[in-house]
Structure formats: structure tokens, C-alpha cells
Amino acid sequence: MKSKFLAVIHCESRNCLKAEVIHNPACCHTQHFRVMFRMRFLKVTGLTVFLVFLATAHSAEFPNIVFIMSDDQGYGDLSCYGAEDLKTPHLDQLAKDGVRFTDFYANGPTCTPTRAGFLTGRYQQRLGIDNALTYQETGRGLEVNGLTVARDLQGKSYATALCGKWHLGYDSGRTPLDQGFDYFFGLLGGNHHYFQHMDRIGVPDLWRGGNAFGDDGYTTDLITREAIDFIRINKERPFFLYLSHAAPHFPFQGPGDRDKIVEPKKKSWQVGDRDTYIAMVEHMDRCIGETLAEIDRLGLRDKTLVIFTSDNGGDIHARNAPFSGGKSSIQEGGIRVPCIARWQGKLPSGEIISAPAITMDWTATIRRLAGLEADPAREDGVDLMPLLTGKISTLPERPLFWRRKSDPSRKVDNPSRAVRYGDWKLVEKTDDSGERFFYNVIKDPAETINVIDDHPEIVRKLSAELDRWEKSVALGSNPSE
């Protein structure tokens, strides 16, 4: 196949991108391009130049993947999920044009666990991740130079980018560029000031590639700008965009709150209200709408699978109705999240999916769409496409597992584990109390009626499943083995 390079030049003074195609087939054989399709960064008189190896035609076989993840957004914080005090017209339209899940779960009740589950396609406990990373923490996160869905897609000639929040490792070998992403723009940590871009302990945390980036724009806007630029640059080839919005995670700052006092190491970092939270969600919805509009403008709608979800249940000021609990708990409100998917011509429009599914199912699904074979040693999730396309009416019943350990760094002490199987959910506290709860989450989604004494045999079996699962993730084997 003939090849060419696209030189994408970022002018730092004007903060804009310019693209120019350079035909040079011989270059792909030189030592300067050791890995095909890997972006290289060069500094030239104030310009950042990205060299992207391109195929001559967009692959008809593999779709583009845009995986959008919001941060700490409640299950009920979309209009199409019942919110009455906020409006999310673009995500509502995405649901009308695609499928909407009612029983979709995050891999974990906090940020890092779910993100690790998505990128690796496995229960994050296999990596020793039960709780979120702390600010500037090193020595923990994804495995150094690990296997991720981004790296898998790189190997299938995809352009790969993360625009937004990472929260999976600060140190060398654990950053996005070390984990299969050609391009990275965003924050390495769990949150930062939306205008000044320092983290909660005052360390600057906004990056382009491996370099600190100075821009006082609103984070949601900056992430969107970079995502749209990436789509434009790679419109002629398959791309994987992990669009990981920081909103509506604290600090609670809407787009008009530039002058609001929010200071590192001060209580103001987490001070907010429902109105500010709504402003953050609604602005994120508008920015997602801009991203989707660009996909349409470029004629890529029928070539692009768009997925939207949240990393865990909502925190303070969020609406997790009709569920109890929220972020950091393994009650339904902490792990049940919105999820929408659209792929014109491939998925039905306006369909509701009630089968239980989980974040890492999308990893398996994406790998199948990219032509990669199922690998039980790499995947704990299942391919959702047979369900989404109507080839099967529901997913085979399977247990889904969660675990939360004490997190002294955040003064959280609620160690527990849970399993959902069919309509049933067993929750066991793993502290000295030994309390256990058993719910029918279809009849009792708010988990208010503990029926543990009414179904001793089912409880016994599910408790044994939890034991087996914990043993398997500790050994690094697959639960199906």
C-alpha cells in the first residue's frame, strides 16, 4: 500500500493547528518511525509538529470509535434518564438515534478503578486497584507499558488519542503515551482547577503529549477543541478517541465561574451547589454536541461508533435516582451509570436495553470490531454487538462483581463486596460488622428491603461466587476458569 505522512503543525502563539500532507513513502522504513502510526513530536521554532503515518484510504472494515466518559455524573443526571432540572439535548438525541441502557454498571465506584477496567478489559482488582489514585501518587496505576485497548487498536492501524482525564498513573511507563495512545491532551490526575489547571495540592496538571501546557481556557472547552482537531486530522483513517471529560467532578466551576474563589488545599476546592453542577453538565452536553456535529460534518456518522457513559455514580449535588448511595459506595447509586451508544446503520434507533452490562464489556466489543479475536486471558467482559444488533435478545446470565476497600487517604472506611446475578444482588461488608444485604434490584432498585433471610440457598451460592472471584483476581486468572 502506498503511504503518506500528515504533518500537523500546532502554532503555540496562535494556538491553532494546520495540516499538510507530505508524500514520502520511503520514510516509513527509517529508524525515525520505529512503530507505524505512532505520533512523533518535534519542536521547531515555537511550533509543535506531529507526524502521523496515514493509509491512503479509510478502512472500510474497522469503524471509528469515540468513547465518551463523564466524571462523577449521576445516573439520573440526563434528561433522557429522568432529570427535570437540567437539559441535555445532545445526549438525549444520541439516545434517540441509538440505544440506551437501563442496567449499565461502572467497573468500580470511583474514578481510577473504572478507567483501569475499561482500558485493560479486565477487573481492575487484577492490577491491585480497588481505590482511586491520590494526587501525584507514583508506583501505582496501570502496569508499566501495559496491554490496553488503545495499544491493541494501534496494532490494527488506528490513530489513538486521549483527550481529557487520565487518572491511571503519573510515573514513566504509566502515562497515556506509554499505554497505547498516540496523542494526549488533558490532566494526569483526578481533577484540576477548570481555569488555572493546577490540581488540589497546587501542582500544575494540564499536558499536551509529555509537555506541560499553559492555557487559561475552561477545561471542558479545551478538551473539546483538541478532540475535534484529532477527528479532523484523522478523518481518512480509523481512529479511537477516548474523550474523557473532567466534568462534572469537583471543583465545582461552571464556564462562567472564572472569578469564583477555588484554592488548592482549601475547603473551597469542594464547595458547590446543584446549580453549578447543572451548569457543568449542560456545558459538557453542548461540547459533546459540537464533537458529534463535527463527526457529521465530515461524513463519518455511519463509520463511527459513539459510546457515552460515566465512570461511577454521582457525588454530592448529583442525582442518582431512583437508586440509593452514590460515588464511593457499591450501592446501586455508586455503580449504576447512564450509557448510550449510536452507530448509524448498525444499531437500532431509540431502543432500550435492560440487560445488565458493565464498562469492560465495551472493551471486548471494541476489540471484536477491530478484528481482534476473543482472548479469555485478556478479557473479563463480553462482546455487546450481538445484543445491540438484535442477533440475541439478551445476554447470557453471568455474575458481575464489585469490591471496595478502605481508603484512609480519603477518610473512606466502607470495605465491602457485591455481586449481581440476574435480578439479585448480594452485598457483604468486609469489616468487623460482617453485615450482609440481599436485594431484588428489579423490584427494589433503591435497595430498601433486605430479603437475605428469605433466600438462603441463593445467598449461599452468590457468596461462594464472590469467594471464587476474589481468589481468581488475586491469582490473576480468569473467573471463568
Image: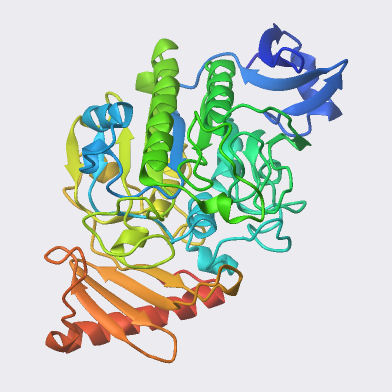
**Of the pair 51 and 70, the residue shown nearer to us:** 70
The residue located at (22%, 37%) in the rendering is 80
**Quick check: 343 above or below 338?**
above
Number of marks drawn = 0
Q: Nearer the viewer, residue 103 or 469?
A: 103
User: Residue 381, located in which quarter of the rendered image?
Assistant: bottom left
From this view, report whether residue 478 is shown above or below residue 391: below
Residue 464 occupies quadrant? bottom left
Q: Is residue 425 left or right of residue 121?
A: left
Task: Tell me which residue sits at (66%, 48%) in the image.
Answer: 199
- Pinpoint residue 193: horizontal percent, then vertical percent: 61, 41
Q: Name the residue rendered at 11%, 65% in the picture.
A: 443
In this view, 233 is above or below 199: above
Scheme of image coloration: rainbow
Q: Is residue 223 left or right of residue 384?
A: right
Q: Quadrant of the N terminus?
A: top right
Q: Is residue 181 visible?
A: no
Residue at image location 72% in from the left, 8% down from the top: 23
Q: From this view, report whether residue 274 is shown above or below residue 296.
A: below
In this picture, residue 106 sits left or right of residue 207 = left
Residue 63 image position (x, y, % from top left):
43, 28
